Structure formats: structure tokens, C-alpha cells
Amino acid sequence: MAQLKTAISLPTMPTPGTEPMDVVRIARHVEQLGLESVWVADLQTGDGKVPSLEAVTTVAAIAGATERIGLGFGTLVLPLRPVPLLAAQLATLQHLSGDRLLLGIGVGGFPDTPFWQALGVLGRERGRRTDDTLRLLPSLLAGKPTTVDGVELTMLPAATMPPVLVGGNSDAAIRRTVAHGDGWMPSLISPELLATRVPLLAVEGRPRPSVTVGGHMFVGSGSAVEAQRAAFVRLLVDLHGLPEAEAERVPMPGTSRSAIADHFAAYAAAGADRIGVGPHAATEDEFLRHCDLIAEATR
């Protein structure tokens, strides 16, 4: 287990009608536990149904409250963000955090929502805008003269380009990883399916990109936990189109330290280098207890 990095996906999406959990407090707790990193999702929809904290400002708050822990975007939706502004934000975060960023990126899965429409970003442009951003960011962060939409600009102070981890389970995400990424970041994928996908990352003459797996964990046992797990599996089938047999293997077991350790070992055997876990919890204190259990299981 020592070679497998363990991360926590922070609860930045509160249940509608409830206040967000204190993710800064949780991040400090995770750092004290000695886990490798914390991750923040980027899911703004503007539909009044899916509340979510904004990702860049959330990471900035966590950076100022922690000292060592890695700060991951899981994943940052690149098509929504003007490249010069994003470069300035990332460079600033790198300077203020001491180069702790892990830049998980994605094309965005909800382009028909009001938030996308209000920004004027078309779903059919997602892939092109993402690739253009990935092509321009290294030069912009390095402080080199860079032409963006016909305008040459130089962003200073220069900063370290964070590792790019490409989110998504699709063939397109794997191709984008090989072309632009330092790592691949699939989510909601079983160890068995992961093992069949990792070989696709291999390119002769180049190191294999790292693999970070994101997943959801139901901690404990009993009828209530089983009902939550069953509802999550049904969501994977109905909303994400997963075959039911595959969806059943996606939730990470949290019934005991040994069950967690065994499941993580299966991911490591399948090729994962890092596991990012989002524990299912109704309250902040419950979330913290789940983090404690995960830390114990991975020592």
C-alpha cells in the first residue's frame, strides 16, 4: 500500500437546502492525517438544483490554510475559463501554495445547463477549447510571449506548470492524456475495467502517464447504508448509462479497514497510482470520521 497515494475528494456540493460543509477545516484535518492530497470538483450548473462551491476560489482558501498537502482539481472544466485568466489564477495559486497544485482537467459534462449558456460556451466546442487551453498554458505559465486569439501577451510572474491529469473514462480522454497529460484521471470505474484501460496509455519511448482513480465510498453497514449504495448504483445506470453489472462494482466498500485496504490494493494491481475517495456522509463530523477510517486503512 505504501506506493499508492491516497486522496480525499472534498464535499463541495451540499445537499440542496443545507449549508456547505467547512471544506477548509476538512482539508486541514486530512493534512494532519498525513494523506497525500485533497481534491475539489468544478460543477456549476446554475439550474438551482445542483449547489456547488466554485473550484478555484475554494482551492485558494484551502491553500492559505494548509502547508503541505497537495491541492487537486477534480476536474477543472477548461472550456468555461478564458485562457489568460486561467493562467493568471494557476500561476498565483502555485506561488501562494508552494507549487502544490494538481491540475485535473475535463471538458465538462453538462453543457446544456444555464451556467454554460450564460457564459456563451457551446457544447460542440468543448474538445477544441480544451485542447487549445492545454496547448497554451505551459507557455503562458512559463512567462513566454504567447499568442492567444491573435493577441500576444506575456504573463508574469512566471510559475511552475502543475501536472496535468486528464479526467474522463472515454477513449477521447485517453487520447488527450497521451497528447497533453502527465496523468489520466478516470472516475466511477471498477478495478477490473481499469485494468483493461491502463494499457491504452502506453506509448513507446515515453513513461506511462500516472493513473488517479476517483470514486465514491459508503462507510459502515446496515440497511441505511445499503439503501444509499443501491440508490447510487441506480443513478450510475440511469444517468450515466453504465451496465448494471459494472455499476454494482463501482462503489468503494467501507465496511472495515481491511475491506478498504483490499479494495485499494485491487486498484493498485490494476495500474492506479493514486485513489481519490469521496466518502458519503450526511454531516461534517461524519465526513471527518470517514477520513480517519480511510487513513487508518492505508497506513
Image (spheres, grey):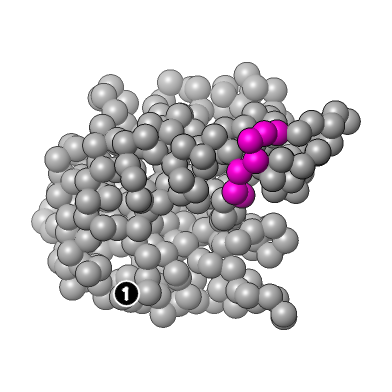
Q: Is residue 194 above or below residue 31?
A: below
- Residue 276 image position (x, y, % from top left): 38, 57
Q: Residue furthest right?
A: 150
Q: Is 48 on the left or on the right of 141, as rendered?
A: left
Q: Is residue 172 above or below residue 96?
A: below
The residue shown at (49%, 71%) is 194
- Examine the rendering and report whether any part of residue 247 can be seen: no
Q: Is 185 on the left or on the right of 145, as rendered?
A: left
Of helix, strand and loop, which mostly describes the magenta segment? loop
Q: Is 267 on the left or on the right of 32, as rendered?
A: right
Q: Is residue 274 above or below residue 48?
A: below
- Residue 184 image position (x, y, % from top left): 56, 61
Element at label 1: loop
Q: Which residues are magenta?
A: 155-161
Total number of numbered discs in the rendering: 1
Q: The C terminus appears in which quarter of the rendering? A: bottom left
Circle 1 sits on which residue? 2
- Residue 110 image position (x, y, % from top left): 57, 36
- Residue 158 image position (x, y, % from top left): 65, 40
Query: Given the image, on which type of amino acid does mark 1 rest?
Result: Ala
| Of residues 150 and 177, the one drawn nearer to the viewer in this rendering | 150
Q: In the image, is residue 159 part of the stretch drawn in magenta?
A: yes
The residue shown at (63%, 19%) is 118
| Res 266 quadrant in image | bottom left
Q: Residue furthest front?
A: 157
Q: In the image, is residue 94 part of the stretch drawn in magenta?
A: no
> For mark 1, does the 10 Å Cα neighbourhood hold few (<14), some (14 to 19), or many (20 or more) residues?
few
The residue shown at (37%, 70%) is 4
| Of residues 175 and 70, the one drawn nearer to the viewer in this rendering | 70
